[in-house]
Image (spheres, helix red, strand yellow):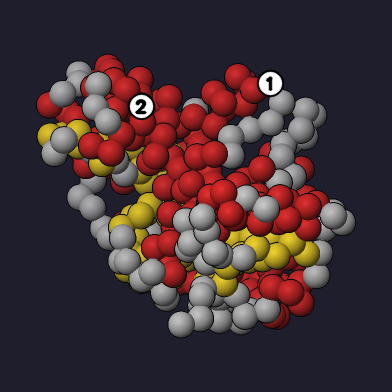
């Protein structure tokens, strides 16, 4: 049987680490593409030279040519600028929109049946832009952020309760970062609701730390940002899609009705499979959480309108 093919656009830390995990876990053959000559080729060769040691048979190709990405089953887009000192949020929005628009157009040309998984920030708006530029059905254009935020939330809950992260289930809604909405009533540790294990003040402190998860890492590193957890989150989504697992994973998807949201991209739990986002899972949430979700979605809508697509 033909092995699945995944293109990862952007050979920086997130993209290269995602590519490495995809081949080491035998999830797919990978095409790693970047505009910088030699960068994807060098990283791909380095990874392939570890195949004997790590015991994988998947292949990775490094390239600067979109022709080499043809017939990909999933395309992961990590390329884009990080926010720099003196750069406003709108500066980042416009610059990354230009980069992402060009990438998506090229990828869609060579892999018209692919599922797109967006990682570039600002995530929710870039996912919406990718849908518009690709011409794909909205269920085949998905953003990775909720899974990362939920993973951070789960780790902090495990740390607070002394549990293993594998014993924690956590879910989040809404946008990435400040607009992320934890839903502690649906979080459990060893099957018990965290509301029975931790007091309200402790839960809120963990909620806020999860919202600030990326910022905390940036402050510690001084230069650079997170890439281990983002790449793991991306790979989990790709695996769910390729292996048609039906796993419920929080992701940024196009909504027409669920949670009272219409014609907007926003983070909610979805079942992932070969068709992309196959079903939105609507959880019971409080009115306060519902209002926060509406505000998050409206923020995405306003930023998307700035692009005048």
Q: Quadrant of residue 156?
A: top left
Q: Is residue 59 left or right of residue 28?
A: right
Q: Which comes sooner in the sequence, label 1 or label 2?
A: 2
Q: Residue at x 20, y 50 (%)?
A: 284
Q: Is residue 37 left or right of residue 98?
A: right
Label 1 neighbour load within 10 Å: few <14, some 14-19, many 20+: few
Between 184 and 276, the one nearer to me in the picture: 276
Q: Residue at x 41, y 25 (%)?
A: 208
Between 43 and 225, the one nearer to me in the picture: 43
Image x and y of residue 106, in percent: 74, 73
Residue 257 seen by the camera: no
Picture disc at residue 254:
none
Estimate the spatial distance between the alpha carbons at disc 1 and disc 2, rounded to whole Å. Answer: 22 Å
Residue 278 seen by the camera: yes
Which residue position holds label 1? 222
Q: Quadrant of residue 269?
A: bottom left
Q: Residue furthest front?
A: 52
Image x and y of residue 182, in percent: 34, 37
Q: Is residue 130 above or below residue 134?
A: above
Which residue position holds label 2? 156
């Amino acid at each position: 049987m033909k092995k699945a093919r995944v293109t990862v656009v952007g050979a920086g830390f997130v993209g290269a680490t995602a590519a490495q995990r995809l081949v080491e876990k035998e999830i797919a053959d990978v095409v790693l593409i970047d505009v910088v000559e030699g960068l994807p080729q060098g990283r791909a060769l380095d990874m392939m030279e570890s195949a004997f040691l790590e015991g994988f048979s998947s292949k990775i190709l490094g390239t600067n040519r979109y022709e080499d990405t043809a017939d990909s089953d999933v395309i992961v887009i990590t390329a884009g600028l990080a926010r720099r000192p003196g750069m406003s949020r709108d500066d980042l929005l416009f610059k990354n929109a230009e980069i992402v628009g060009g990438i998506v157009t090229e990828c869609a040309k060579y892999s018209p049946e692919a599922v797109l998984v967006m990682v570039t920030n600002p995530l929710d708006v870039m996912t919406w832009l990718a849908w518009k530029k690709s011409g794909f059905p909205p269920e085949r254009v998905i953003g990775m952020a909720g899974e990362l935020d939920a993973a951070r939330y789960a780790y902090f809950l495990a740390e607070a309760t002394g549990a293993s992260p594998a014993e924690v289930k956590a879910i989040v809604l809404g946008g990435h970062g400040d607009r992320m909405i934890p839903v502690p009533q649906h979080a459990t540790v060893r099957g018990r609701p965290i509301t029975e294990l931790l007091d309200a003040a402790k839960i809120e402190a963990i909620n806020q730390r999860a919202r600030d998860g990326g910022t905390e890492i940036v402050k510690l590193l001084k230069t650079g940002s997170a890439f281990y957890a983002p790449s793991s989150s991306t790979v989990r989504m790709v695996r769910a899609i390729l292996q048609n697992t039906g796993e419920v994973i929080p992701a940024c998807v196009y909504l027409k009705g669920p949670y009272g949201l219409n014609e907007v991209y926003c983070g909610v739990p979805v079942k992932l499979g070969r068709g992309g986002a196959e079903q939105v899972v609507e959880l019971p949430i409080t009115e306060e959480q519902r209002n926060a979700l509406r505000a998050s979605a409206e923020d995405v809508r306003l930023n998307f309108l700035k692009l005048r697509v």
